[in-house]
């Protein structure tokens, strides 16, 4: 009983500290992720001092599944599908997709070359989590940017999350398969079937739940989504697409319920479901993010950071991330790419997918310090870039407000008399 009380106390303190870390992050531009990892390291040192060993991994599987669902759902709810948004959405989608594939390919080449026992197929699985942008870090961090830049980062990071997760699970499903081409064709068919089921299920859920009265319907809705996800997994479908499409449908109801379908939609009732669901997904994602980074800090080996090999591999991967990003942003966005170039942190999805790597492909020679190094490096680079951009903006504003505007004394125009005109 005493152990359970201690666990409740520690868990409560971690969530309270995480809340203050988030508030501090907004003022200092230091990602709360770094603070949570440091908190985990401090807890680890405390546990070592008390000679206590706790096994956190059994809960990671369930937390990881719920976390992925909530992150994808939260990201889908953020996407506004409007005609005027079509070009920014497509632009961000292309950049996110090319950036993900190029970064994964280069990171896989590096790990395949430097890490013993890692085949190219396995290297792709390890490289994918390291190539996904963290919307959980980016979206709260770009609130002070202008609307155009902020919108780009929201779309890009959201697509990077969703595409990265799909790529990771596609790669893990191919483990042990010798027919990669048919596997890809089968994957496309799987996606098509999943999309069809997802659209039908999403319409039915919205139409049914708008008539349900009661205070517990949102948790009932989340239970239905979890059930659909689990059943999709059993049927070997791309289950996260179900969550993505549901989020898009409920977040853009006017677009999906048009013509005759609009008669079936009670917009005010359905909109209240969307608003409450948005709050729940944000809160749940916050809790999952908190415990995952703290646990990550507890389980990480700090000694691996002192390894020259870890520093070299991590440094090369980080360098390739920004080189690829520079080329892409210059091609698609032009010359105004600061601070966008440096906003490419790795975070929660990276950790979640790293723990989801199948046991049969895990490589003993892979140092988890590479993961920590890349997360810290990309977060710090983003922090310095945001601070620099904030100071640059403030200087421009101060310069503009301090510039005096010249003036001349106004004089009434003189009118010449007729007498003067004759002269």
Image (cartoon, helix red, strand yellow):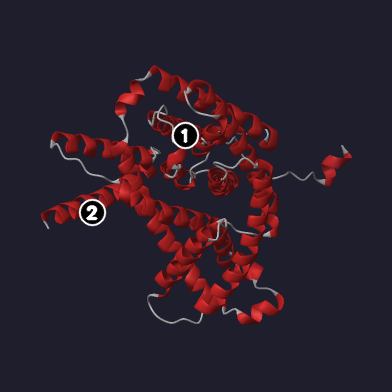
Badge 1 density bin: few <14, some 14–19, many ≥20, Cα 10 Å: many
Mark 1 or mark 2, earlier in chain: 2
Q: Residue furthest top?
A: 308
Q: Position of residue 19 (x, y in %)?
A: 31, 50
Q: Residue furthest right?
A: 422
Q: Nearer the viewer, residue 139 or 64?
A: 64
> Which label belongs to residue 245?
none
Q: Nearer the viewer, residue 161 or 237?
A: 237
Q: Position of residue 342 (x, y in %)?
A: 52, 32
Badge 2 density bin: few <14, some 14–19, many ≥20, Cα 10 Å: few
Residue at the spot 17% in from the left edge and 56% down from the top edge: 4
Residue at the spot 20% in from the left edge and 34% down from the top edge: 45
Residue 188 to residue 365: above or below: below
Q: Is residue 401 visible?
A: no
Q: Position of residue 295 (x, y in %)?
A: 31, 43
Q: Position of residue 414 (x, y in %)?
A: 74, 43
Specify the quadrant of the image occupied by residue 24: top left
Specify the quadrant of the image occupied by residue 380: top left
Q: Is residue 289 visible?
A: yes
- Which image quadrant: the C terminus? top right
Residue 373 to residue 418: above or below: above
Residue at the spot 70% in from the left edge and 59% down from the top edge: 83
Q: Nearer the viewer, residue 334 or 410?
A: 334
Residue position for label 2: 12
Residue 273 to residue 139: above or below: below
- Which image quadrant: the N terminus? bottom left
Residue position for label 1: 382
Count of numbered badges drawn on the protein: 2
Residue at the spot 80% in from the left edge and 45% down from the top edge: 417
């Amino acid at each position: 009983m005493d152990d359970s009380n201690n666990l409740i106390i520690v868990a409560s303190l971690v969530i309270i500290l995480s809340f203050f870390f988030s508030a501090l992050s907004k003022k200092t531009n230091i990602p709360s992720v770094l603070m949570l990892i440091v908190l985990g390291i401090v807890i680890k040192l405390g546990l070592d001092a008390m000679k206590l060993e706790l096994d956190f991994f059994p809960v990671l599987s369930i937390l990881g599944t719920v976390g992925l669902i909530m992150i994808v759902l939260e990201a889908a709810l953020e996407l506004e599908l409007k005609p005027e948004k079509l070009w920014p959405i497509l632009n961000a989608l292309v950049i996110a997709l090319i950036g993900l594939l190029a970064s994964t390919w280069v990171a896989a080449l590096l790990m395949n070359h430097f890490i013993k026992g890692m085949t190219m197929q396995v290297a792709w699985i390890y490289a994918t989590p390291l190539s996904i942008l963290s919307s959980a870090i980016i979206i709260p961090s770009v609130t002070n940017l202008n609307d155009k830049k902020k919108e780009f980062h929201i779309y890009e990071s959201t697509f990077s999350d969703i595409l990265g997760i799909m790529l990771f699970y596609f790669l893990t499903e191919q483990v042990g398969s010798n027919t990669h081409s048919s596997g890809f064709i089968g994957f496309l068919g799987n996606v098509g079937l999943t999309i069809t089921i997802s659209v039908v299920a999403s319409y039915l859920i919205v139409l049914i739940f708008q008539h349900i009265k009661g205070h517990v319907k949102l948790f009932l809705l989340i239970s239905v989504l979890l059930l659909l996800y689990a059943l999709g997994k059993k049927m070997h479908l791309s289950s996260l697409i179900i969550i993505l499409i549901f989020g898009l449908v409920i977040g853009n109801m006017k677009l999906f319920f048009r013509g005759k379908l609009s008669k079936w939609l009670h917009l005010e009732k359905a909109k209240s479901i969307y608003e409450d669901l948005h709050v729940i997904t944000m809160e749940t994602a916050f809790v999952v993010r908190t415990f995952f980074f703290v646990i990550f800090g507890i389980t990480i080996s700090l000694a691996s950071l002192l390894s020259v090999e870890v520093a070299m591999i991590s440094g090369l991967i980080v360098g390739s991330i920004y080189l690829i990003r520079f080329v892409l942003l210059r091609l698609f966005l032009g010359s105004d790419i600061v601070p966008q170039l440096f906003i490419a942190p790795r975070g929660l999805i990276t950790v979640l997918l790293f723990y989801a790597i199948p046991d049969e492909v895990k490589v003993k020679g892979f140092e988890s310090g590479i993961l920590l190094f890349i997360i810290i490096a990309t977060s710090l680079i983003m922090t310095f870039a945001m601070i620099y951009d904030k100071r640059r903006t403030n200087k421009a504003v101060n310069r503009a407000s301090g510039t005096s505007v010249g003036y001349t004394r106004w004089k009434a125009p003189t009118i010449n008399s007729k007498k003067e005109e004759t002269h």
